[in-house]
Image (spheres, rainbow, N blue to C red):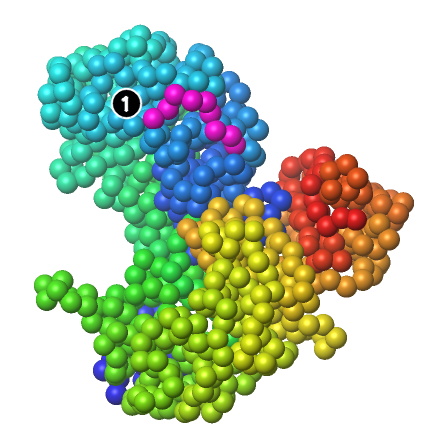
Amino acid sequence: MMVAGPSSSWKGRTRAWVLAGGAIAAAVAPAAAEPGSPWVALGPYGATVRALAIDPSRPSVMYAATSAAGGVWKSRDGGMTWAGAFSGLPQFGAAALAIDPRNTSTLYVSFPQGVFKSIDGGVNWSATGTGLLPGAGALAIDPSHPQTVYVANGTGLAKSTDGGAAWAPAQSGLPSAGGVLALAIDPSAPQTIYAGVAAGGNGSAPAGTHGVFKSIDGGASWQPAGATSPPVTIAALAIAPGAPQTVYAGGKGGIYKSLNGGASWTPSFASASDLFRALAIDPGPVGTVYAGSANGFIGASADGGGNWSVTTPTSPSSPLQSVLALAIDPAGSGTIYAGTASGVTTGGVYKSGDRGATWTSNSFEGVATTDLDGLVVSRPGQAVAPDFLFATTAGQLVGSPEGGVTWTSAALPNVPFLSGDEVLQFASDPVRLYLFAVDVVIAAGHASVGLFEGGLGGWGQLPNPLANLGWVAIDPQDDNILYLGSPLVRSADGGATWTGFQGSVLPAANLAPVLIDPLAPTNVYAWANASSNLYKSTDRGLTWSLAGATLGSLDVLRVDTSSPATLYAAAGGYVEKSTDGGASWQVVYIPADPVHHGASWIAVAPVVESTMPATVYAVLAGAGVVRSADRGVTWSALPTGGLGGAVKSLEVDPQDPWRLIANVAGAGAWAMTVPALPGPCVAGAGALCLDGGRFQVAAGWQTTKGAGGAATLELTPDTGALWFFKPENLELLVKVLDGCALNGRWWVFAGGLTNVGVTLTVTDTQTGEFRTYTSPIGVPFAPLQDTTAFANCP
């Protein structure tokens, strides 16, 4: 019996999308992972933005450094849309970002692994030279000599005079404890540098005495910035434009100001329980000073810090989190951006066009950097279009009714704490879920487990017969039949009562989640990793028998819906296959490194045409995704570049067998539409067939007013042209060359005479492998020379 939550009218309420908590976020176009990637972000959107930088020569171009997946994102339209700019960067941990003021295509970003540099506006990145300790943080570039760069690393400071080729210590006199948290260079005298530090130190800086240090010799030596240097941790610094003796310092408890280059300081704004991590000064005539608060507000002063007003930007779903970065239009338009910490469906970049009086909602939506514990998609047979997505993350449930266009966070008043990834849907109602949660009672020193039924409209707790509930599964055709484990128990009345299987062939413990055949749910499989044994029931779990044993510890099991006796398993790092219902197994795919990057997940696409076998996908832990279009005989890799994280799990969209939905570590949900799996190339208005029909070439175009597919024109056996609007106006020229004799690869070359958005896809029809190349709206199509495109020679 339910104690609270769903009632007999529950389904009607949730179908109308009445939310128990949170509001629907603003709809935005999904962002691509990065140029050339076929993946698009589905969300939940938002990210912890630790640094912002605006191109001083083109204020509509800006960069955001995030601590989550990817690292750096780029906007070409003043923060309205974002694209990944992180090729060559580590996956996590960006801390600071800086643009060369004289050559704005050159950027630096710091990570725990070091400092990385781009010389092409963030398209590609590479690590800078040696001499750095781990833990790179705050960055600053000498405005007069941009080859001189400073970075906080370890517990001190390093300097490069050759654009990052080599680094040397520049920390003599700085505190040895706590580290440098902020840097600012005097633009009128670049040898003068200020450093904000964690209060404390040694020698001339007794613990708790100085938060700001100053160097007048380019970092060769440092002294406390005056006898009255703020006696607290300083995490932000700003120098007033046109008045370099005026310096602001933000830190623990408030804002401090110096009018004499740090010789003396006075408090400007106090907030005792706060930490100010961001400062910025408007270069316009008003010269407003802005301060970002860890408590989620932005302070503004138009009189040099004498008086302050406070604004609190809000997103559609929750108040602003901590403000970690601020950036202002260098042209003095009064446009200001705030980089914030991330909640579940918040965080990212907020924008104000009126000097902080009003703020837009989160303009970082479309960028997915949330780590999802679990992700589920509405199942086949459910009358839902587009997909419902549900996910658990950070102890919360989030959902999207349109397959990632918008997201909302659900209030869970009766659910103590989500344990992780077990969120499963009803077959008959795609917005009703079962999940299990852990109620940790710290005072009593134990944890209890609960099973809950509900969704975004409310929750109620079900009787739980197990002390150590590990998973829950539901019959896709009968809402009343539930399975819990481990040990396995079954309910035929929606969880009101439960039956165990003591004395049966099933093991009493360590039983993995059951697999229910989605088309024939009378067939249920269970396996025990301790023995690698697989068990089967043909009567919806009433009786069980031993089916066989896999060849290794089994992680994921899937049924081939076109051949129910065929099973696929990720076991022992390999992909295994059974054609006799699990009685015997054979290895059909061995990863290059099955120990460290073995098969960890399996997905099977439903059959589209009776003449085609099911397509099988395997996730290789930390190493991408492979697929087979011939039931495991041959395999090819899918592109995963630009995702910013490793694929954790993969699902086939039940309403579109060519669309994949991936749960990416630290990057939320992503989707990709794969080309039709292999078959002969059929030339037509929308497809070029090159090299004897082996390679199929197709393209799409996009403008701010619409989108469409390209028409084609074959020119030679290996070359073709494409046009978008008029046949006499050719937009693209594409060539696929046989370079097998030179480097064992097929090559793809392309050139264009267009600045509309372009997505070019080249598919090897023999293997199903494909490459996607994109060019954003408003950017001239850059010459393409991919000499490593396809490895399947000849």
Q: Quadrant of residue 715?
A: top right
Residue at 26% x, 65% y: name it: 417
Q: Is residue 540 above or below residue 361?
A: below
* Residue 464 seen by the camera: yes
Q: Nearer the viewer, residue 726 or 454?
A: 454
Q: Quadrant of residue 535?
A: bottom left
696 or 465: nearer the viewer: 465
Q: Is residue 457 magenta?
A: no
Local packing at callout 1 (Cα closer than 10 Å; few below 14, some 14-19, many 20+) is many
Residue 696, above or below 50:
below
Q: Magenta part of the protein: which range?
A: 125-133
Residue 195 rendering spot, x and y as whole percentages: 27, 21
* Left-right relation of 159 to 756: left
Determine the residue positioned at 37% across, 71% down: 530
Residue at image coords 43%, 31%: 109
Task: Report the quarter where the N terminus lies.
Answer: bottom left
Residue 408 as seen in the image, left or right of residue 381? left
Say above or below: 178 vs 103.
Answer: below
In the image, residue 729 sits, relative to residue 197, either above or below, namely: below
Q: Is residue 477 visible?
A: no
Q: How many marks?
A: 1
Residue 528 x/y as whole percent: 40, 74
Q: Is the magenta region chiefly helix, strand or loop?
A: loop
Q: Residue furthest right?
A: 716
The secondary structure type at the circle numbered 1 is strand
User: Of the residues shown, which amino acid type is indicated by label 1?
Assistant: Gly
Identify the residue at horizontal 40%, vertical 78% (top origin): 473
Residue underneath mark 1: 156
Q: Can you give x and y, in whole percent of width and height, for residue 269 in the image?
A: 18, 31
Expressed as whole percent of the image width and height from the top left, the position of residue 492 reads: 37, 91
